């Protein structure tokens, strides 16, 4: 099977840790965008059937003999982009995309590395609207395993390039460009939520910030940020930053009900993974629904301890 849906008990060696966590969130009742993973086994089948192994090995030999790393890595990626995915794999990917809505449905395709060392090569392809676009993006995600940084890292640690694999995630796209996005994370007895209009993870500067104390008698503390700009989708691909409207700058991004839902998700994620987690969320501006789009371990900020005139930063363990 070349694709698996983001539900149930998934194998991180086949779909990557990010997808395993998303499936666990979904099983716990947290809303995630519908989607599926193209597996590591599918990647390896593609490499084998397209006979890419010899091209990879030859480019690596030339690099080790003195060829520039950027040139060697580009040769491998070019070979990937020129190769055709196996027909049965294409059929499965297209069938999966059809189940998500088919042509005309906004989709997102991103890398889901098995090895955390490959996280830096996590390419993302946004607002794809045809099955052909989705298939092409999957192949480009496969090729991203041979970025210059990825090849250089594997060379440095002595890892076999032919043993690496890159699962790929295909999901419906949350229209946060006309909605909002942000993070939620637990801090002691409350949940800290940060929000902005448009796409992306907001920085502290300019974002709305909320403290939510969940429970039978919840308490919400709100701080409205300036929110001078937002990130939206650009045609035909990519993103761009635009000014917010006066109404957006003057309004709070989230309602009380949305804040309580995010706080509940954050508490659930911390319990589910038995450690503090940072939850990335997005609100679809077309449907008004919130979605969890990623969850990752969160390192608590360092505590500052003063001892006899000396100040020492001690990291808290999550």
Image (spheres, helix red, strand yellow):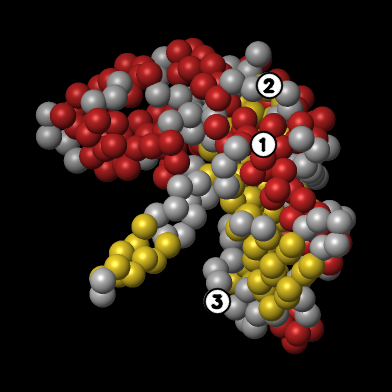
x, y (%) of residue 119?
45, 41
- Residue in front for this viewpoint, 208 or 299: 299
Residue 107 lies, with reference to residue 309, above or below; the image says: above
Residue position marked by numbered label 2 in the rendering = 9
Q: Residue at x 35, y 19 (%)?
A: 162
Instruction: Determine which quarter of the picture holds residue 261.
Output: bottom right
Q: Is residue 111 left or right of residue 190?
A: left
| Discs 1, 2 touching: Cβ within 8 Å | no
The residue most toward the left is 65
Residue position marked by numbered label 1 in the rendering = 272
Label annotation for residue 298: none
The residue most toward the front is 308
- Residue in front for this viewpoint, 154 or 270: 270
Residue 81 lies, with reference to residue 302, above or below; the image says: above
Label annotation for residue 205: 3
Q: Residue at x 82, y 63 (%)?
A: 218
x, y (%) of residue 177?
71, 63
């Amino acid at each position: 099977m070349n694709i698996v849906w983001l539900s149930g008990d998934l194998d991180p060696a086949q779909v990557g840790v990010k997808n395993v966590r998303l499936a666990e969130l979904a099983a716990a009742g947290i809303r995630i965008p519908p989607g599926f993973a193209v597996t590591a086994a599918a990647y390896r089948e593609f490499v084998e059937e397209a006979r890419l192994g010899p091209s990879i090995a030859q480019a690596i030999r030339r690099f080790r003999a003195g060829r520039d790393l950027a040139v060697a890595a580009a040769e491998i990626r070019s070979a990937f982009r020129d190769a055709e995915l196996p027909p049965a794999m294409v059929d499965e990917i297209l069938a999966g995309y059809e189940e998500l809505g088919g042509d005309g449905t906004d989709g997102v395709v991103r890398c889901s590395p098995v090895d955390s060392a490959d996280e830096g090569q996590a390419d993302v392809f946004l607002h794809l609207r045809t099955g052909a676009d989705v298939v092409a993006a999957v192949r480009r995600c496969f090729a991203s395993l041979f970025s210059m940084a990825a090849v250089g890292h594997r060379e440095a640690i002595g890892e076999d390039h032919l043993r690496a694999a890159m699962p790929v995630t295909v999901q419906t796209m949350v229209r946060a460009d006309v909605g909002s996005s942000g993070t939620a994370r637990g801090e002691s007895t409350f949940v800290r939520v940060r929000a902005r209009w448009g796409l992306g993870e907001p920085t502290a500067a300019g974002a709305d910030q909320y403290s939510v104390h969940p429970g039978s008698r919840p308490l919400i503390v709100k701080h409205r940020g300036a929110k001078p700009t937002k990130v939206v989708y650009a045609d035909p691909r990519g993103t761009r930053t635009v000014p917010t409207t006066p109404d957006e700058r003057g309004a709070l991004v989230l309602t009380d009900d949305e804040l309580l839902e995010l706080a509940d998700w954050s508490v659930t994620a911390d319990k589910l993974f038995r450690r503090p987690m940072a939850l990335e969320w997005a609100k679809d501006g077309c449907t008004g629904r919130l979605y969890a789009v990623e969850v990752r371990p969160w390192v608590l900020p360092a505590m500052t301890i003063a001892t006899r005139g000396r100040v020492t930063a001690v990291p808290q363990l999550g």
